[in-house]
Every structure is written in structure tokens, then in C-alpha cells.
Image (cartoon, rainbow, N blue to C red):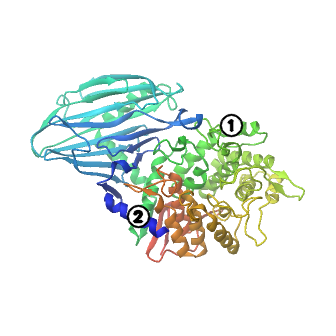
Amino acid sequence: MNKIIIGKIFFLCLLTHLSFAQWQITAKNFDSNNYYGVTVANGMVGIISSPEPLKVKDIVLNGAFDAYGRGRVSNIMKVFEFANMELIVDNQLIDKKNISNFAQTLDMQNAIFTTTFDLGNKVAVKSNVLALRHLPHSAMIEMEITAKQDVEITPISLMQTPDMLRDVNNYYHLIDRPHSLIPLMTSVAKTPTGKHTIAASNSFLFEEERGKEPQLIHEEWDNGMHRLKFTRKLKAGETYKFSVVGSVISTAHVADPHNEAERLTIFAALEKRERLLKKHKEAWAKIWESDIIIEGDAEAQRAARFSLYHLYSFCREGQAYSLSPMGLSGLGYNGHVFWDTEMWMYPPLLVMKPELAKSLLEYRFERLTAAKANAKEHGFQGAMFPWESDDSGQEATPVWALTGPFQHHITGDVGFAFWKYYQVTKDKIWLRDRGYPMLKEVADFWVSRVEKGDDGKYHIINVVCADEWAENMDDNAYTNGMAKEVLGFANQAAKELGLPENPKWKEVQEGIIILKFPDGTTREHASYNGEPIKQGDVNLLAYPMKQITDPKIIKKDLDFYWKVLADNLPGRRGQSPAMAHGVFSILNARLGDTETAYKQYLDSYKPNEVPPFNVLAETAGGTNPYFATGAGGFLQTFINGWAGLDITDAGIIQLKTKLPSHWKSLTIKGVGVDKKTFMVK
């Protein structure tokens, strides 16, 4: 089955002429009707590519939510499309029908998306799109037009409004100084309910000295779009360069987004193209000091870097925003934050870039008060985090999903992530101010959530399992195991700070039951009898948890639950999410079953790739990329599986592992706060 799927994907890649070097992924001759874009992002602004030349599909702004779309709940905002261009050459408007040699390339090393094409024998065009890494609310588009004969060109910068924004106002004015002329095209609108105001502004950057810039014409077509253009004649062989910088911001970020969007655009414009590009590249060079290097498998190298690129793109240091399952690649899952963050995307970031991982924890800490209120509303103590979290930190799950009221393991997942950060960094000030206050509330929640049975054991009744097909079950293995983990971590944190151990936390930790079948296989929940599962649940007790450490039991659980994983059952391929396969691969790699681990590693991403860039969908055959959760699980197969890195009280250690036979070496560099290098040969 796997060979057939991989073969089909390989054939599709041949048709679309997907190619890649060590850092670049190029798509040519792609089908515009079967196109899933790639994203350039800086942790705040996400720009999604389009099959249309010089266009972007969407621009997404982190942190800005309002109620519209799926489920009568909040949704992350699409914002003004300030990065779209049009180009007229000798009165001919460029589109995908009249161009040739159309290619799109993502440079992962520098986070630059490049489009190239020709218009007959008239011009060759190149554009670069960058979400500027050092300027969180700003982006730049570089344009380069080379004349093959004498031509007249009219480049047009567009400012377009997505349908869900309302009360749109468009503005245009010039900032005129002796040393610089800055044209500002700005749009301001309300979000669907009026909760927020969003503003975007952009400006041309010309290479000519002051006074020799092209003459600009501003046109307002309607409230949904206005545009700024100029016309220039080029001689054969002449190359003309210019850029557009733009910024977008909302009242979720500042009190006065209209003025701030224009200020940020003015700042970028006066920094000039070369300086913006230099600082952007420097910022990405620093990020890539933490990298995964595979010798002997170019495809594995591409896939690892592509996944790292996306996680790095979707978050940034020094802020309090988290990661949605789809990152900043669109509106998937409303941009909400799930367990996907703490259990799948956060772990590779914690190992590779603790400073980025810290931002995800800060998001949760800032919403601790909301989680405490949520616990009280449900009759519990401590903090109860929502299954789907937005900017408010309140429950944002649609009411038709039972996960909102009952998928309580999310609270344990948050506590687990907080302790792991301390294990990696040993930052006692952070533990005092952030880690322990969080773990205390999480532990208090579990003490109030358990029920003591007639057997003298503690039980957790009526939950949605990590295997989400199992709803309203008792004593779910994952939920119970995670509660045991974080209760122990809370007391460890207290000890680290010289505080007394909480005896109730210890009593409940030791008393929570993990169910077993008569043969010793771990039972998913009290009613479980071998039904198909959406994803591994029990297996997570061996990794990332350490509730099960006996290799024989780990192997028994792996074999049992692999057979009932939906993706492995006849006619059910595509029902399990990408990361479901990754945990099986990690555990088999740690057990030394390299052949099985490698097959499961391939299953964790290959069937989920979609054209033309092989971005990841959530499931095999899915159509909802980019699935950053899957990227996180996939990266853990390298970091925690093949490389054997393990987070312990002693920090990051390396377990003995064996690589796939055709890999020469695997290097994980820039690890942890000390930026160590680990290698397996």
C-alpha cells in the first residue's frame, strides 16, 4: 500500500517538475487547479502563494480574531492583500495564459519566495516575496523586469480587501521630503463584528535618486480595491528594479492601527531595499544555526528542512502567540490553539530553538486566568485550559464538537510542556515566575478532577480520549498518564524552588490507574476492546511520556495499536492524521527496529504531500495544507527517534539508536541553550 502511494506521488512530482536543491524547492508546469501554495511568514504575517503570476492567495495576521466562519466561534483574520501586483507590457496585461517558463521557488534558507516567467520575446520577470523576519508586521516584494526588446511597462501595486472585512476606507497620500518621496496607499476596515480595526499600508521603493522616480497614478476602483501604478520605457537588454514594502496591523496589537501601519511602512521604506534584505537574511541565518543535516538521503534532507522551515516561520521569539495546526498558512481550524502545539510542534522547537518555544508557553501563561475561570465554571479547582483556544484563552470549540467540554488532557499537555522547558533550560527564575505557578494550577485541577473508586484507586471519568473517536470514556490511558506525569512534575518543581512537596499531589499521582488487558497490553480506556483508532493514544505513554518504560510492554503496545490504526485498515486510508504514524516510528527506532521505524517514518509524511511543492496535508489524500502539526510529529522522528535525543532532568541526552541503512549520518546542530551538536553515523 505504501509503495503504491509513494509511487503515485513520485509520478505526480514528475508531471509538475518539482525539483529541489539543498535549500530550494522549485515548481514548474504545475496545474493551477491542483495547486496548494507555500507560505512565507515571520511569526506574525503569513503570505500564501498563488498559481497566478505576481499574486498571493491570502495574507493572515497572527493574534487578530473575530467571530465568523466555522462553528459560530472566533476565526483568525485574513487581512488586506497588500502584496499583489499586476504588470502591463505594451498594453498587454500579464496573466498565466500569456506567459511562459513560469516557475516558483521557495528558498528555505532565506525565506524568500521567487517567481520567474517570460512574456514572449518582450520581457523576463522576477519577483521575490519576503515576510521580513526582523520587522514582524512588514513584508517586501522585489521586482526585476528585463527587456528583451524596447518595451513600455506599467507595474501596478494593488491593495485588495478580503470579503469578510467591512466598513472599508481607502487612503492615498505622499510624504514629501528633500531626500525621499514616500507614496502611501492605505486601507482601513473593521473585522466582521466590529471587534477590531485592521489597517494595511504599502509604498513603492525606487532605485532612482530623489526627483527621478517614476510619476505615480493612484486609482480607486471601489471600496474593495485601490491601486498605484507608473509607466516606464525600457530599452532592449535593460533591467529595471523596484520594490514594494507593506505593513499590516490591528487593534489586537496597537491602539491606533491606521497610523501605525503607515509609520511602519515609512520606516521600512526609509530603511531601503538593501538594508531590509540584509537584516532579513541575517535573522534567518541566526535561526538556521539550529538545523538537521542528513547525509546520504537528499529526499529526507529536503523533507526535514521543509518542516523546520515552516515551524520556524510560524512563530517568533519574544512574543506571546502560539501555533495553530495550520500555522499561518490559512484559516484552517480557525487559527485556534490545540494540544497540537504542546505535544507535536513545541517539542522540536524546544530542542532546536528554546527561545521560540518560550513564546508558545508565554501564550498559555497569559491565559492562565481564563483557564482558572474555566475550571470554576465546570466545578473544578486550578486551571482547565480550553480544547480550542483563541486570543481570549476562553473555550473556542464549536458546540457540535464534544472535544470542548471533555478533552481535558489538554490541561496536562500544557503542564507537561512547561516542565520540559525547565528540564532543557534550567532557568530557575522562569520556573519561579512562570513554570511553578502554571504547574501548581494544573496539579490542583487534576486533584479536583479525579474520583476515588471502591478499589482505592483514582479514576478520571467521562473524557474524550487523545484518540478522539473515543468520546465520553472512563480512565483513558493518555489522559490518566498525562495527569500522573504533571502531578509528579509539580512536586519536582516545588522541590527545585525549595518549596515543600504537596502530599495530595503525590497521593493522586501514585493512585491514578492505568488499565491493562489480561496479556499486559495497555488498554486505551475502560470500554476499549480493539476498535479502530484515529491515532495512537496508549503509545504516547512511552513517548513523550515515561509512564511505560519496559521495552517488552512498549513493543506489545506498538504492535497491538498499529494493527488497529485506521490508516492501516482496508478502505480507511486517510482517516488518521500525519503525526499518528510518527510516534510509532520514534518508538520503534528507539527499540532498534529500524526497518519498521523507517516504513512508519515514510508513512508520517509521504502520503500527505500535495502539489506542486509537496506541502503537508493533515491526512493521506487530504487537501488542507499546511499541516504544521504533522511537521512537528515528523521532525520528532529525526530528533527523538533516529537521533535519540531525550529530554530528562539532566537536560538533553542522547540514547543509542541506529540509522536507516542508506543514511550515512544524521546531525542535529544548535541544540538547546548551549547550542550543542549531536551526531549519529
Q: Residue furthest front?
A: 571
Question: Foreground: 493 or 613?
Answer: 613
Q: Is residue 643 visible?
A: no
Image x and y of residue 567, in percent: 56, 62
**244 to 545, vertically: above or below:** above
Q: Locate residue 163: give its quadrant.
A: top left
Task: Say what secondary structure mark 2 lies in.
Answer: helix
Judged left or right of residue 300, residue 395 is right
**Which residue is under mark 2?**
8
Gap in angstroms between the C-alphas marked 1 and 2: 50 Å
Image x and y of residue 570, in percent: 57, 65
Q: Locate residue 140: give its quadrant.
A: top left
Question: Foreground: 372 or 602?
Answer: 602
Image x and y of residue 513, in percent: 80, 60
- Which comes before the other along the chain, label 1 or label 2? 2
* Residue drawn at the location 47% of the way across and 77% of the way down: 661
Q: Which mark is residue 329?
A: none
**140 to 616, vertically: above or below:** above
Q: Nearer the viewer, mark 1 or mark 2?
A: 2
Residue type marked 1: Thr
Q: How many residues crowd mark 1 within 10 Å: few (<14), some (14–19), many (20+)?
A: some
**Which residue is under mark 1?**
369
Judged left or right of residue 108, residue 70 is right
* Residue drawn at the location 33% of the way across and 62% of the way down: 14
